[in-house]
Amino acid sequence: SRAHFFVFLSHLSLSFLSFQEPFQVTIAPEALLIMDLHAHVSMAEVIGLLGGRYSETNGIVEICAAEPCNSLSTGLQCEMDPVSQTQASETLAARGYSIIGWYHSHPAFDPNPSIRDIDTQAKYQNYFSRGGSMFVGVIISPYNRNNPLPYSQITCLVISNESSSDGSYRLPYKFEVQQMLEEPQWELVLEKTRWIIEKYRMSHSCVPMDKIFHRDSDLTCLQKLLECMRKTLDHVANSFIAEEFLAQIENLFLSNYSNKKWNNTTEENNMCPNDLPT
């Protein structure tokens, strides 16, 4: 199993050098579902905490749960609201999980870390590593302009102690993440879906879920989200149970997500997320 060093050639292109992974990363379907749900509804970056376990003996980080947080947006970047971060930490702790990472979205561009992402990840790592914990960063890109497929692109990384050639930042590892084969807690995911819909449906950055997600696709943003979730549940849940669950997700959006402002102007109504300003 191998990881990769990101080497920045420019703001737009990356190359990879292979190194042995410092540890392995596995992720539960529940965490993937919630990150996807959260990322799909906002053209502004979203953010949250990851809960799970680290086995030093086996060298494996297990990402078991994702807890959405409120963000303090500063332009295109976002930071975690401290109050929301505390609440999310308590929620994960109550489920018996340690804080083992964070996630944020790159709504319409590659899931590669910016210099600021690297700096934020390094600070988090330094803080959590005091107790011997591992701390990973996950970047999820639901509407990358360069990706016509319905599946989100996800990058999982940690920051190494190696510096870039000019010494301006520390180089990150990119992991090859394995998905766990366990059913999510269905009602918990539905509960998080209700919270996400209520929070974002009237937001200025909300995604019009009834619009085509990419000019090379005929899927709406909602249909694309459901395809993402269907892929995550493949081989994890009985197909009948999975489809019943996805129907509930779809109904929640159709019943509660409608945003009147998207129906007010023809110009906005015809936009897909890839055409929206970011």
Image (tube, rainbow, N blue to C red):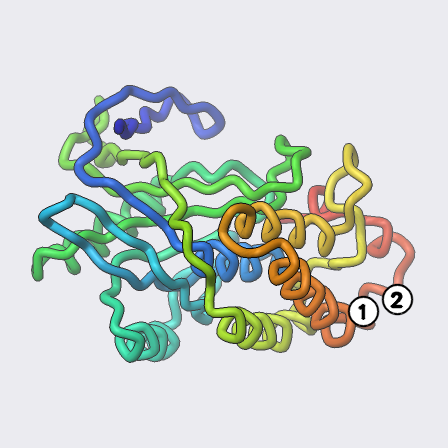
Q: Residue at x 35, y 46 (%)?
A: 116
Q: Position of residue 124 (x, y in %)?
A: 23, 56
Answer left or right for 232 relative to 156: right
**Tag 1–tag 2 contact (CB < 8 Å):** yes
- Circle 2 is placed at which residue position? 264
Mark 2 crowd level (few <14, some 14–19, many ≥20, 10 Å Cα): few
Asked if residue 162 lies left or right of residue 227, the reply is left
Which quarter of the rendering shows the N terminus?
top left
Circle 1 is placed at which residue position? 261
Give left or right: position of 238 versus 164.
Answer: right
Q: Secondary structure at mark 2?
A: loop
**Residue 104: percent from left, percent from top:** 44, 54
Dot 1 alpha-carbon crowd within 10 angstroms: few under 14, some 14 to 19, many 20 or more: few
Mark 1, secondary structure of its residue: helix
Residue 130 visible in this rendered orientation of the protein: yes
Q: Quadrant of residue 20?
A: top left
